[in-house]
Image: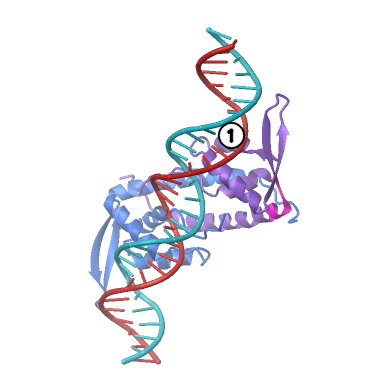
Chain colours: A purple, B blue, C cyan, D red
Amino acid sequence: MAKKQSIEHTSLLVLSLLSTEDMYGYQMIAELTKKFDNTFSMKEGTLYPVLKGLENDGFVEVYEEKTESGRTRKYYHLTNKGRRQLKTETETWRAYERAINSVVERAVYGAGV
Amino acid sequence: MAKKQSIEHTSLLVLSLLSTEDMYGYQMIAELTKKFDNTFSMKEGTLYPVLKGLENDGFVEVYEEKTESGRTRKYYHLTNKGRRQLKTETETWRAYERAINSVVERAVYGAGV
DNA sequence: TAGTATACTTAGAATTTCTAGGTATGTCAA
DNA sequence: TTGACATACCTAGAAATTCTAAGTATACTA
């Protein structure tokens, strides 16, 4: 019964980020760390394999770009198929969230015994 | 990248259910199935081992009771320690939920391309 | 008395994420 | 120029969680 303080729903988060702009992996991690206020963090060992999977599924496309300094980055672009997938995963998340809350909201903590 | 249509956060749900009344395993599953509108379901193979774990951690206590028909049921009762655990897990869930939403809400689906 | 619903249990597989390394490049200070 | 550090990506194996697919046993009902 150990505690897992991880980010789940990795693909939902990645697809969401990519829906507004193309990003590279390291940038996504930085972005999520900010949003999550350091309470959770997306690990590199989690993200990169998931990105590979999204690419295989045709949800994202990859291209390389050099910074002015010469460093190479792999940018990910959301495809139309990926956008439809985002919609589906978002709806699944909403249903899940509502259901969890319908149970949790009824809970009674007592007087913080 | 297969889809897992499972209930996560099992212990949060169980502790929440038990915060208002003692329940037995099969009853919890029926209760959750209702709340989740059949979109997700808690499997027996998931629940019973988790209940065992909650018992080992001292979050719940078990007692047996016979129905008028003679069938034996194992009821689970939330301990004070379990109630504190529920509070912690609820706060973790809220933080997680907020963070996910802060990312998902900014997403753009496009014209449903 | 056969079938179905209730009620609990468990082993092994599947899935997801993490740990803990690795490689490589650019920047900055000593 | 050398060392430290941040950036950027990658991967194998372990850990955690949930599911699948059994099994046992009892009660109801047709």
Provide the secondary structure element on which disc 1 rests: helix
Asked if residue A82 shows in the view, the reply is yes
Q: Observer-nearest residue: A18 or B91?
A: A18
Image mark 1: chain? A
Helix, strand or loop: magenta stretch: helix
Q: Quadrant of residue B64?
A: bottom left
Residue under numbered circle 1:
A30
Q: Residues within 10 Å of mark 1 (few under 14, many from 20)?
A: few
Q: Residue type at mark 1?
A: Ala
Residue B70 higher or lower than A36, as above or below: below
Which of A103 and A67 lies nearest the eye of the viewer? A67
The residue segment tinted magenta is A77-84
Q: Is residue B72 left or right of residue A65?
A: left
Residue B104 appearing in the image: no
Q: Quadrant of the C terminus of chain B?
A: bottom right
Does residue B42 sit above or below C18 in this rendering? below
Magenta stretch: residue A79 in it? yes
**In the rendering, at what x and y percent does residue B101 appear?**
58, 46
Image quarter in which the N terminus of chain B is found: bottom right
Residue at 58% in and 47% down: A50
Count the marks: how many? 1
Q: Position of residue D17 (x, y in %)?
A: 42, 53
Q: Is residue B9 magenta?
A: no
Determine whether, in the image, residue B5 is placed left or right of residue A106: right
How far across and how far down the image is residue A27, in percent? Answer: 62, 35
Percent of width and height locating residue B27: 37, 67
